Image (cartoon, rainbow, N blue to C red):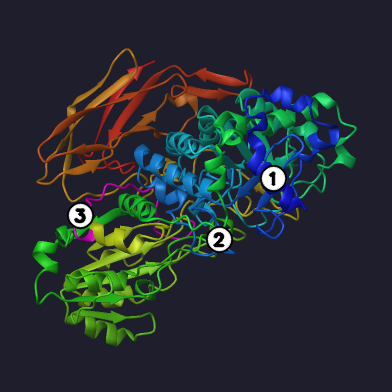
Amino acid sequence: MKAVALALALLSHNAFAFQDVDELIAQMTLEEKITYLGGAGMGNYPDDGRYVGTVWANDRLGVPALLYNDGPQGFRDDARPGTTTAFPSGLTLAATFDVDMATAWGSSMGKEFFDKGANVILGPGMNVARVPVNGRNFEYMSGEDPYLGATLVGPVIEAIQSNKILANAKHFVNNNQETNRMDQSANVDERTRYEMYYPPFQAAIDAGVGSFMCSYNKINHVWSCENPETLKRDLKGKMGFEGFVMSDWGATHSPSLMEGLDQEMADADFMNYGNLSGMPIENIDESVKRILKPFIDVGNFDLTPDEIAGQSIYNNVTSDEHFNVARQISAASHVLVKNDNGVLPLTKKSFWSKDDSSVAVFGNQASEPTVGGGGSGYVSPSWLPTPLATIHATLAQADYGAESDNVFFGDDDTSVEDMQALASKVDVCFFFLATSSSEGGDRANLNLDADSYVSEVAPFCAQSVAVVTTPGAVLMPWANQVDAILVNFMPGVAAAFATMDVVVGDVNPSARLPITMPMVENQEGMTTEQYPGLDDAHNSSYTEKWAFGYRYYHLHNEQPRFWFGDGLSYTDFTLETDSLSWNKDSKITAKVTNAGDSRGAVVPQLYLSPPAACDEPLFMLKGFEKLELDAGESQTVTFKLTDRDLSTWSVDAFDWARCSGNYTARVSLAGANFGGDSYADVTRII
């Protein structure tokens, strides 16, 4: 009967479309109001009308059901695998350093959720990557820097919600590890939260996000979903969030309405009529308004009959258009971290069209590729092109599925001796290497799943290219043995095509690392107290404050394998150091020139070092912009520093406070890799 009521409500919910939300709430009984404060369980539609999360329709008032679904890489539909697009992950998107790609990602995913009948996408994830082994780093679009996440989050939120569905900012907050996630206490001071972990969430609020998801962990010994300091004082108070807060699934431990939780998911174990009916009606009304108003604001309760009729979880919402969007984003997120002697690109004209060109391909990933992470972020691809088949077709100069006699394959079980023999007789070796991760557990280490043979085989190759698929930071002990390295993170369904787009030069790589690649395990020296935490209460102390990621390496004068923000191109760019200026309006300008012989994109980045008295990082990202330049073309990039950029969080004032003194602004073409002539400084007293 509930499924019937749901269908009737979906067909009739235009009835109140133009009413004010307060008028709507005034028509509700107390029981109807409280229904919105807890979920109806999780399951697979259509048997009982449920998506991953559901609030039943109010057919009396013509209010549609609230239908929530995973996840951060696309619509997760385990019951109908292959009916949605497995997009690149959030961390993969972060590698693009490109707001246009963020818009395309959010828009395309949002459309698939809409067509599947959901009205809330449980994403994007935006936690800053504190722990390199965190199992969910692949989901989060901030990488290891709050400014990167804050810049990309806004376009994603706006693009998702342009599809008349809500985005969901998660996981609020300090959900930075999966180990002991159900009871771990993230013990982090207020200033660190505001400066390092809140900015992406603040950007989501500024973009009008409709919902937040509070996390499983505790913050300073208080459950995230019943923490009045982070939910009421910070999120709904100082940060100005006007939408609703839902719990992560099973993250509720009490009827927490008065502490700042608006809705329990997936079941109403605590937030139910029995527990809430005695609560002040004004608090109940406030939460119901917070829940319903965003749906009205984005137009979800005002759909046309044709729009409603076109929605169904049975729909296969994949399309050539979305496959191509996934391909474009994936290609734009391939980070070229090494390219000795200009091995790449192997152009179609100079290599792939020659009758005698030969290739050896190594690794199971070439025939059974990993393209996404696990858990609630998993999406079953509609089809999965393989790197091996794509290389075959490229060398055969034919459509996908064709084979070439000059492509040789060695899987992970091939002996090193046989791999060496194959490597010795070909022009180019490709190593496809990967590891993955999932919600529910952290990675045991930063190793790739099978790469021990690379250092033994690569010396037998005339030229060698490694393609690394990873959910986060990864070790590459063989990096000095190969000529070129491409990192594509969790690249999505079109990965094989995107990789070849870059390899053959159809796409000139412009991506940058959103995380630092270390030389060894735990190079940042986190103690057990910091991660994974001590004692039975699993207390994790954030005593490093801002000193993680590239900030740690600068503070301790250490060298990682590859730096945050770095990445190569097939052309060369120069920064004209004498063009760097900082005017009275806090505008910093610099001139960048494409000094190579082909069109390409570069990402100049602004790092700011405040006065020593401010107790801030030596240099921290405060701006970036992607520039597309023709060979020989120059362009001036302008960064505008805001009051917030020149402020630190004052606990005493409970506000941002300008920090005065001598600042150094550094514009870099190589991210946090400050070396050679890739950067220039300008100073100013503020």
Query: Disc number at residue 8?
Result: 1
Locate residue 612, reporting x and y percent: 44, 26
Nearest the viewer among 3 and 561 is 3
> Please, what secondary structure does the residue beneath circle 1 have?
helix
Q: Residues within 10 Å of mark 2 (few under 14, many from 20)?
A: many
Which mark's residue is nearer the viewer, 3 or 2? Answer: 3
According to the picture, the residue beneath numbered tag 3 turns out to be 506
Locate residue 112, reporting x and y percent: 49, 49
According to the picture, the residue beneath numbered tag 2 turns out to be 438
Q: What residue type is labelled 1?
A: Leu
In terms of sequence position, does the residue under pointer 3 or pointer 1 come before the other? 1
Instruction: Tell me which secondary structure the magenta stretch mostly adopts.
Output: loop
Which mark's residue is nearer the viewer, 2 or 1? Answer: 1
Q: What residue type is labelled 3?
A: Asp
- C-beta proximity under 8 Å, tags 3 and 1: no
* Above or below 478: residue 616: above
Q: Which amino acid does label 2 sit on?
A: Ser
Picture residue at 36% right of the left edge, 51% below the top: 321
Magenta stretch encompasses residue 510: yes
> Please, what secondary structure does the residue beneath circle 3 have?
loop
Locate residue 311, reporting x and y percent: 55, 49
Q: Give the distance between the C-alpha atoms of the residues marked 2 and 1, in whole angstroms.
A: 38 Å
In terms of sequence position, does the residue under pointer 3 or pointer 2 come before the other? 2
Q: Is residue 217 visible?
A: no
Residue 228, picture quadrant: top right
Nearest the viewer among 118 and 473 is 118
> Please, what secondary structure does the residue beneath circle 2 have?
loop
Figure quadrant of the C terminus: top left
Question: Which range of residues does the magenta coloring cover?
Answer: 503-522
